[in-house]
Amino acid sequence: MLAATTASITHDDPYQAGRDLAAELNDALGASPDVVLLFAAPTYDPHRLLAGLHRRLAPRVQLVGCTSFAEIGHEGAISGSVTALGVRTRDLDAQALYATRASGDSFAVGQALGEQARERSAAMLLLFVDGVRLEGASVLRGAQSVLGPEFPIVGGLAADDASFERPREFCGRDVFEGAAVGLALAGRLRHATVARGGWEPIGATRRCTRVERDRVVLELDGQPALNLYREYLGAQGRDLKTAGIEFPLGIVGLPDRPYCEDDRVQVVRAVCGVDEARGGLRCNRDIPEGAEIRMLRATKDDLIRSASEAAADLGRALPGGRIALVFDCFSRKMVLGARYKEEVAAAYSRLSPDLTRVGFYTYGELAPVAGQTEHHDATFTAVVIEG
């Protein structure tokens, strides 16, 4: 059995914020937690924050986390806070892990973390990656090369208020840049995961016939990708600075692994820029050559509804869960604007009130699809854990 609680603090002094956060976790649990997941706004000095937090935590605590675009606490979505989950457990073993760029490239960083998780006989890996200095999809593939494609990995990419300059990662008392940190969970563990975008596919399925470095889609069905994208957007295609977030691409099939026959979107990719000279679309994450895609759109109500449906699926899959971890995308928050809190509130309304909840807004989400963890954009993801 495990006991869990969540606390959120806002304070001008990061050291005091850390002390107050630890005090709330300790009071609610009756003792210092064994495990802490920490998500913090990038405005807090992370070194002073951790110093204050560890001042009141037991030396043995296993702590991991990262900076965020916004935080998700037990009551809902918030901004500018320090938010943490504290857990006390006897039957579930948890070990904080990290790997830095000194381990090699992004794939090697993932391999190093995967090796550590395997050495600890992990049943699940919570993974938080610097998505600015590392390539999140490559880190994931590196971990999967060790743990296997069906090993459950969930988490997200560290964020920094959409400045894309300096996200930070936390492990124990250390603050990292350009690292991947994780929590290896071992022991008796049941879980259920969900990844839901809520985006509606529009138009024909098209094949990526020319892609450069898995990021720049130059041709769709042999035609300039940018021309087709602008044609699809119509008048909204005049300003592509925000259109790529509001109108992403959906992968419905891969060359070596078609997802399904009905063109259901499983993985979303935001368009982060264009190559005017060559007529290409620049994506934040990988789209391999030969992939089949659909253009996507959604209203704010669609996004909120999809989060609610995802949470309902989780409740049915594991009604006896104890902890819910939510990893939502910064791009959804930007699209929703002032309504971003409604999305998490809608999801929470479909979860058991007994679940302890925590999470953050990420630069990319990690969650299984059809039994294999994928790297997502613009997607609401969550995991419920019973230990």
Image (cartoon, grey):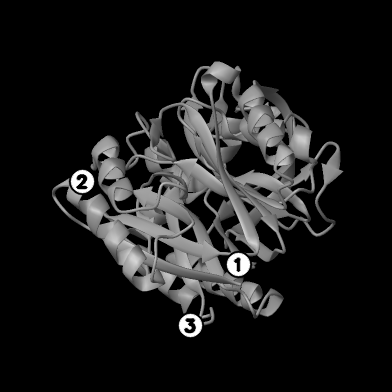
Q: Earlier in the sequence, mark 3 or mark 2?
A: 2
| Element on which disc 1 rests | strand
In this rendered view, identify the residue nearer to me: 10 or 245: 10
x and y percent of residue 282 in the render?
53, 29
Q: Quadrant of residue 379?
A: bottom right
- Within 10 angstroms of label 2, few (less than 14), some, or many (20 or more) residues? many
Query: Badge 1 is on which residue?
Result: 384
Q: What label does residue 280 carry, if any?
A: none
Q: Earlier in the sequence, mark 2 or mark 1?
A: 2
- Within 10 angstroms of label 3, few (less than 14), some, or many (20 or more) residues? few
x and y percent of residue 72 in the render?
39, 61
Amino acid carrying mark 3 in the image: Pro
| Element on which disc 2 rests | helix
- Residues marked 2 and 1 touching at CB (< 8 Å): no
| Element on which disc 3 rests | loop
In this rendered view, identify the residue nearer to me: 240 or 97: 97
- Within 10 angstroms of label 1, few (less than 14), some, or many (20 or more) residues? many
Query: Badge 2 is on which residue?
Result: 14
Q: Decide if residue 45 is on the left or right side of residue 308.
A: left
Query: Badge 3 is on which residue?
Result: 353
C-alpha gap between disc 2 and disc 1: 30 Å
- Residues marked 3 and 2 touching at CB (< 8 Å): no
Residue at the spot 56% in from the left edge and 49% down from the top edge: 155
Residue at the spot 38% in from the left edge and 46% down from the top edge: 68
Amino acid carrying mark 2 in the image: Pro
- Quadrant of the frame with the C terminus: bottom right
User: Mark 3 or 2, which is nearer the eye?
Assistant: 2
